[in-house]
């Protein structure tokens, strides 16, 4: 039945979607959807070793006995939470299951004392693209606190991020040409991520539905999920990641430019002293690009990308405190003690 409401979310139930595309209109704008309790808990299985879980969902042809498995890793405990690492084998290319396979990492989070309960599952999809799932540090605040009241939460490191098989400049350097790099990266798009989700759901939940929560790019992933496998979803919750349906990308960016200018005006209104500081930083970096510890150069243009943080609640303050310490202050050296004059020579006898 109805559960406690989650404010500020766009929610779309999928139980009424007759086809992958038709009928994708949201049925509610706020609130936590009804759920059907899961009949199976992952803790019904052994807590160690590999577990066979051959998918019969959209992954279809990848159900090979040697690779249709997952492994339970380390379990750790934070106040009020039990965290368990899960590793899944997934094909790099779902159209070529006999080819290379990769690892996809999921962290299960459940309230302490409910490890063996039959709570419904909630899958979290992070934004980016390119960011791993958040690492839990506290149960006391935020969406995780609210979700753990009624869900068993699964934090997915989308393929290419976090503990999943990574995509970095080091891994891409193994490909001899840009064309081969691009061909490899094609397997890390939304369509492959959603097929990973379906494979994981089939293995872990025995084909039962789950709720998905998507932040930013995670919302775009949910739209793909609703198109490809609406039957898999009990509900979809999207926060700040709903792609435009009637506006072009150019119109969206024009509106974004106006918003960026307004946020900059408000930032300098709050911290007028940063006007000169930013000008000094840009002037210095224009003539002296600075090497970064992680590689590459900090240029003036790259520095100005800090403005992306202005969309966050504390973005102004974070940027201000970073700017005010941009230049190194020369150290204050201690004044050397005066050297006493040499002693007069003793008179000769």
Image: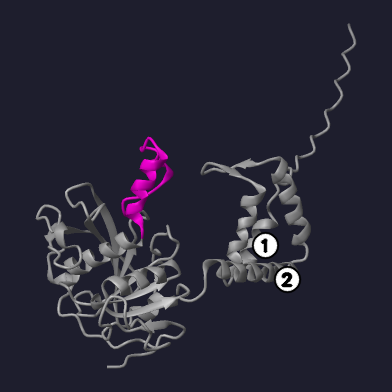
Task: Answer with the quarter of the image where residue 312 lies.
Answer: bottom right
Q: Is residue 178 rendered to the left or right of residue 23?
A: right
Q: Residue furthest bottom?
A: 1
Inspect the magenta stretch and tell me whether residue 166 lies in it.
yes
Viewer-side residue, 165 vs 198 = 198
Describe the element under mark 2 as helix, strand or loop. Answer: helix
From what the image shows, is residue 59 above or below residue 1?
Answer: above
Say which residue label 2 marks: 270
How many numbered circles does the render carry?
2
Residue 283 picture location, percent across and down: 75, 47
Q: Residue at x 58, y 72 (%)?
A: 313
Residue 137 picture location, percent across and down: 41, 67
Q: Earlier in the sequence, mark 2 or mark 1?
A: 2
Q: CA distance from mark 2 to mark 1?
A: 10 Å
Magenta range is 163-189
Task: Answer with the quarter of the image where residue 340 lies.
Answer: top right
- Image quarter (top left, top right, bottom left or bottom right) of the C terminus: top right
Viewer-side residue, 5 vs 99 = 99
Task: Answer with the quarter of the image where residue 208 lies.
Answer: bottom left
Cβ atoms at labels 2 and 1 below 8 Å apart? yes
Question: In this rendering, does residue 141 appear at all?
Answer: no
């Amino acid at each position: 039945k109805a559960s406690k409401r989650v404010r500020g979310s766009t929610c779309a139930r999928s139980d009424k979607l007759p086809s992958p595309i038709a009928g994708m209109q949201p049925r509610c704008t706020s609130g936590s959807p009804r759920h059907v309790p899961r009949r199976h808990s992952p803790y019904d299985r052994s807590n160690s070793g590999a577990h066979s879980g051959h998918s019969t969902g959209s992954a279809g042809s990848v159900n090979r006995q040697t690779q249709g498995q997952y492994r339970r890793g380390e379990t750790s405990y934070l106040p009020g939470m039990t965290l368990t690492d899960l590793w899944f084998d997934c094909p790099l290319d779902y159209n070529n299951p006999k080819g290379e396979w990769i690892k996809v990492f999921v962290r299960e989070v459940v309230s302490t004392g409910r490890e063996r309960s039959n709570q419904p599952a909630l899958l979290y999809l992070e934004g980016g693209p390119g960011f791993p799932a958040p690492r839990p540090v506290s149960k006391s605040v935020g969406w995780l606190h609210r979700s753990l009241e009624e869900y068993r939460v699964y934090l997915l490191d989308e393929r290419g991020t976090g503990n999943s098989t990574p995509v970095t400049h080091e891994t891409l350097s193994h490909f001899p040409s840009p064309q081969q790099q691009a061909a490899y990266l094609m397997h890390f798009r939304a369509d492959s991520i959603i097929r990973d989700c379906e494979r994981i759901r089939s293995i872990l939940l025995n084909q039962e539905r789950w709720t998905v929560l998507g932040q930013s790019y995670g919302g775009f992933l949910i739209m793909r999920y609703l198109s490809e496998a609406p039957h898999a979803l009990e509900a979809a919750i999207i926060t700040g990641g709903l792609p435009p349906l009637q506006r072009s990308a150019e119109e969206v960016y024009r509106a974004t430019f106006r918003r960026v200018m307004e946020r900059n005006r408000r930032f300098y209104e709050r911290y007028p002293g940063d006007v000169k500081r930013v000008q000094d930083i840009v002037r210095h970096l224009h003539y002296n690009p600075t090497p970064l510890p992680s590689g590459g150069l900090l240029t003036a243009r790259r520095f100005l990308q800090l403005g992306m943080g202005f969309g966050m609640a504390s973005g102004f303050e974070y940027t201000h405190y970073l700017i005010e310490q941009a230049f190194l202050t020369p150290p204050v050296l201690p004044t050397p003690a005066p050297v006493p004059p040499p002693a007069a020579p003793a008179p000769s006898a």
